Amino acid sequence: MMMLLMRITQRSLSFLFMAALTSVPAFCQADLTGEWNVKQHEDAPERGQGPELGDYAGIPINDSARLRADSWDASLLTLPEWQCRPHPADYGTRGPANLRIWKEIDTPTQVVIAFHTHVQWQAQERTIWMDGRPHPPEYAPHTWQGFSTGKWEGGMLTVYTTHLKMGFARRNGTPRSDEATMVEHWIRHGDYLTLFQLISDPVYFSEPYVRSTDWVSTPDQTIDPYPCEVGEEVERAEGLVPHHLPGTNTFINEMPDRLHLPLAPFRGGAATMYPEYALNMTTVSVPPVIQNEKRAWNPDRASDHIDVLHVRGGVYMLTGAGANIAVQVGNDGVFIVDTGIAKMTDKVVTAIRELSSAPIHFIINTSADPDHTGGNLELRKLGVTIAGGDVKNLESDATVGAQIIAHENVLNRMSASVNGKAVLPFDAWPTETYHLRKRDMFFNDEAIQVIHQPAAHTDGDSILFFRRSDVVVAGDLYMPSNYPVIDLAHGGNVQGVIEGLNRIIDLTIPAAKEEGGTMVIPAYGRLADEADVAEYRDMMTIIRDRVQNLIAKGMTLEQVKAARPTLDYDPRYGTNAGAWTTDMFVEAVYKSLSKQ
């Protein structure tokens, strides 16, 4: 009881502390540089051996976050793609976090460009930009440390952070989404440094989460390196993601049982942040989770402009024309993956011509869907097919237009007729197909693999791997803005989607701290890496297992929908509007598994 009261009281005092700071007159900028030794008198268990399972007290989580935390299994950390993940910026200072801070100075002007921080635990490196640069666009990749900009407010450094990867609010599975933002105040009082954080998360928090961390100046301390290597720690069935099915996690009762306290206060929620809650400790009231209509997925939606992001090597990502488009440029010409929707073709052409004036030689369609193939007709006209040997009439038909390549099921779908008449013009169809598991190509001094993923989004999905640039194009297997579209009518299946995500993870190799390395271009949404795909794969696997369990209990489709097996992921990926809703997704998962 005392520990719970102390935690709740600390949250309240933090609010009072911030209110007091706002009334302090401006004073000179403090020197934050140097070495700092962390004071672990706050939230000691959380800062050392780890918090108790099921203890979400003092965190303003909603019902979705609570279910996700209850489903978390610590064995997840033994998966290779989880082992070297560092703490994100909002949590990185909570461990044994001895700290070094230094300035980056522009030599000619002697202006501070940035502050850099290094946290000993997991060697977390962070940059706080002080030169007024803007935050990256929405489609830019997210990182563990996010993107931070700072400004002085009197003697207090205020920092604003965006573009964080999915993380945790507490190190027991309590989630914090990748849509969270953070405001920090760095304050120095003599030899003491205080970091005050306000974390806002529209997905999992009902109001900002507040916490503070303290250090003491220790100039002579040693900060050791922190290497990490992935190892095979546990033998398990391929594709298994450890988690607890809803209602089966008995560990969440251990702490209240041991302390002889009711379970309610440990379930978290905004009310548990305030001291008055301790007077009665009743069941936490949390606002209902409402699916966000802003996530409505409309594949034919056009943008005002095309955004171009350099990924790596000669590969670029174009967004705003329906599905994302990948473009590879080099001495041999232009190589395109998917062509977007037809009404955006002119703007796509303009964007490509800003990258290269060379002819388009190859177009790959990862799917037959119009948001991937709508620009085929016009973009093909701008290209030239590389032909030779015994091909006749090289000055005419054989070389006219770029070569369009896809799996044979894509051609079958695009060439289908209604009442004896083709729906799509002949020149928009693939000019060449493959039917085996992959096709190897070489273009612009780069090996390119076109890999078929059967029975996933459809039966004709392709993944591309630019091996020299180290970039994967995922197609419709991965769209981090929404649940994946499972087109049952055209051979789609939830198991194929999960297998495709695992195949992408097999292709990707992250750089240090499970970040960067092989980059992944999704069908929709921001540029990603292996950790992002693994997060999505975990979500899909957990939902599949839940629905499979409900089917095994004899539940009908309507009963499964009523059980809300996607509750903890709905505020992040779900929507009740647009061309692909949460209800449609659950139905597709149910019918996929029922067939099996």
Image (tube, grey):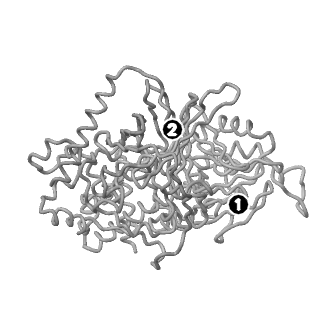
Q: Which residue is mark 2?
A: 148
Compare residues 223 and 62 and report the one nearer the observer: 223
Q: Specify the quadrant that holds the C terminus.
A: bottom left
Q: Is residue 275 left or right of residue 95?
A: left
Q: Distance from label 1 to label 2 (Cα)?
A: 32 Å
> Left of 498 or right of it: where is 1?
left
In the image, what residue type sits under mark 2?
Answer: Ser
Residue 499: x, y in percent? 51, 68
Q: Is residue 344 above or below residue 480?
A: above
Sequence order check, earlier mark of 1 and 2: 2
Q: Residue at x 17, y 46 (%)?
A: 285
Tell me where residue 95 sits by quadrant.
Answer: bottom left
Q: Classify mark 2: helix, strand or loop.
A: strand
Residue at image mark 1: 467
Q: Identify the amino acid type marked 1.
A: Arg
Do tag 1 and tag 2 residues touch (Cβ < 8 Å)?
Answer: no
Identity of the residue drawn at 53% across and 34% down: 135
